[in-house]
Image (tube, grey):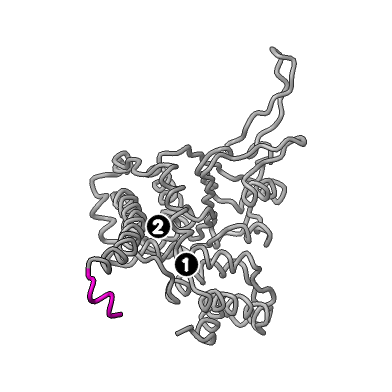
Amino acid sequence: MDNNFNNPEENMEQETPRMGWAQEKVADIEKISDAVDRIKDEIQKVIIGQDEVIELMLAGLFTGGHVLLEGVPGIAKTLTAKLLAKTVNVDFSRIQFTPDLMPSDVVGTTVYNMNSSEFTFSAGPVFSNIVLIDEINRAPAKTQSAMFEVMEEKQVTVDGTTHKMKPPFFVLATQNPIEQEGTYKLPEAQLDRFLFKINLQYPSLENEQLILRRFREDFHNTQQDNIKAVFSAEEIEACSKIIEKVHINDELLDYIGRIVHDTRNNGDLFLGASPRASLAIMKTSKAMAAMSGRDFVTPDDIKYVAYPVLNHRIILTPEREMEGTETSDVIDEILKRIEVPR
């Protein structure tokens, strides 16, 4: 100790590398929050509100997951997804799921080339970077199953040949929870492949009034034309690497484990969450921390992502469902019951 005080120059030399490392780390984190702000600014040229939805979608994009948007018609599910795609300078495709859609219409098929006398693979619309699947629950199970492999392994196998997707690969799907006629419920295995299920709500009165003012002289929503790409595939990869380095201590990992384990031993639930849910909470809590400008995860980050990660992965018991219990109620009870690390 005496040596350090007696030799301040030597002490400064020892401290300089640590200070430089800290500054570099903060600068990296600031890249994430800067990217979020840029994308939000573009989307909010058209969309009013929906801050949480945009943040969760970006968390999914940065962590390599997929997002399911659920809500009644007319609350800008598809529009928000399209605008997000416009802000990123990557390939985009939209697939409208219908009852007569075939798997080959999604992933592609092998066709005979008359000129070369060979069979060649004709790629379907799923071969893109950002894929919007509109009304995913309108296609039958056979077509929905075409998404199983590509969503989990980012590849498609047709006629024994595997075709890899180019990164990034991000699926945004929408569905309407109210209308049941002509729809097919997504199987649990497919739901589990979605990182988040985001339930969109009606806008507040204040936001609805702002929507009316914004579009009173724009009947055809020409403001969409003002949205420009402000992000690239390389930046997505860079953000992902930064998020991977965000610190999460062992106590918080144990906290995530207890939350998910509780869903498997809960009297209100028929089906609990899988280890995929634990990993999803860990990844996205790190993303939310970075998007908030921090290089460490807090319990609040975990609580913030717990509901969109878990709500589509758990099933209520028939008794609780008949009583009108919501999955959000059970998740809230679990979060209140599990002791938060100090």
Residue at the location (51% across, 44% down)? Answer: 168
Q: Where is residue 36, by image quadrant?
A: bottom left
User: Disc 1 to disc 2, how far (Cα)?
Assistant: 15 Å
Q: Quadrant of the N terminus?
A: bottom left
Q: Classify residue 251 as left or right of residue 79.
A: right
List the residue tagged with mark 2. 54
User: Residue 254 magenta-drawn?
Assistant: no
State the SS at label 1. helix
Q: Where is residue 161, by image quadrant?
A: top right
Residue 194 seen anywhere in this rendered image of the structure = yes
Q: Eyeballing the image, is 198 above or below 130?
A: below
Q: Could you tell me what secondary structure mostly forms the magenta stretch? A: helix
Q: Residues within 10 Å of mark 1 (few under 14, many from 20)?
A: many
Q: Quadrant of the C terminus?
A: bottom left
- Residue 248, given in percent of the width and then of the height, sits at 48, 70
Write down the region rendered in magenta.
Answer: 1-8
Viewer-nearest residue: 331 or 13: 13
Residue at the location (54% across, 45% down)? Answer: 169
Q: Residues within 10 Å of mark 2 (few under 14, many from 20)?
A: some
- Residue 138, given in percent of the width and then of the height, sits at 61, 50
Q: Eyeballing the image, is 88 above or below 194?
A: above
